[in-house]
Image (cartoon, rainbow, N blue to C red):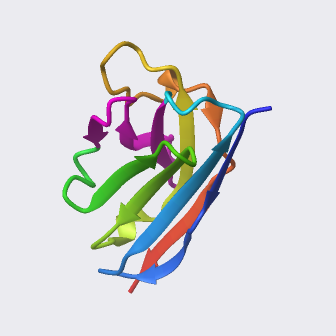
Amino acid sequence: QVQLLESGGGSVEVGGSLSLSCAVSGLANDRCMGWFRQAPGKERKGVATINTYGDTDYADSVQGRFTISKDKVDNSLYLQLNSLKPEDTAMYFCAADWCPGESVPMKETDFGYWGQGTQVTVSY
């Protein structure tokens, strides 16, 4: 049974930092993985993704502030969030699936396995 379990969300002030983790079980460690987020009333969008080679892609809105990483040994995914802004407030989801060749997928439809999400709230 495939399980993706996010942790590390919380409330933080503008300019602060958070570290999100996603523990993956039931899947081999050679999948593409990513972080998506969904704000209230908005569609879920890609934040950062990583392929099996370690290549990464980021949404323009988080480039330079967020860092995605993956640990193949324990099959975990991480997202370091720095310089947080109120517009970063959302439910953050971990996702995984087969990689489409050597590219780094960023669309929601590229991923078939999802976690339940962890809430990130940024306020003044």
Q: Residue furthest right?
A: 1
Against 79, residue 54 (above or below) is: above
Position of residue 32 measured from the top left corner of the image (x, y, whole percent): 45, 30
Q: Which residue lies most toward the left here?
A: 64
Residue 97 figure quarter: top right
Identify which residue is drawn at 32% across, 37% down. 54
Q: Quadrant of the N terminus?
A: top right
Place of residue 23 in the rendered image (x, y in percent of width and height, measured from the top left): 62, 51
Q: Is residue 105 above or below residue 6?
A: above
Whether residue 69 is in magenta: the answer is: no
Residue at the image point whose x is 43% and y is 47% from the top: 70
Is residue 55 one of those drawn in magenta?
yes
Q: Nearer the viewer, residue 60 or 50?
A: 50
Farthest residue to the top: give it. Answer: 101
Q: Is residue 9 visible in this depiction of the protein?
A: yes
Left or right side of 116 for 1 = right
Q: Horizontal and vertical percent for residue 42?
A: 50, 46
Q: Which region shows up in magenta? A: 32-58
Residue in view at x 32 percent, y 30 percent: 53
Can residue 40 be seen in the rendering of this structure?
no
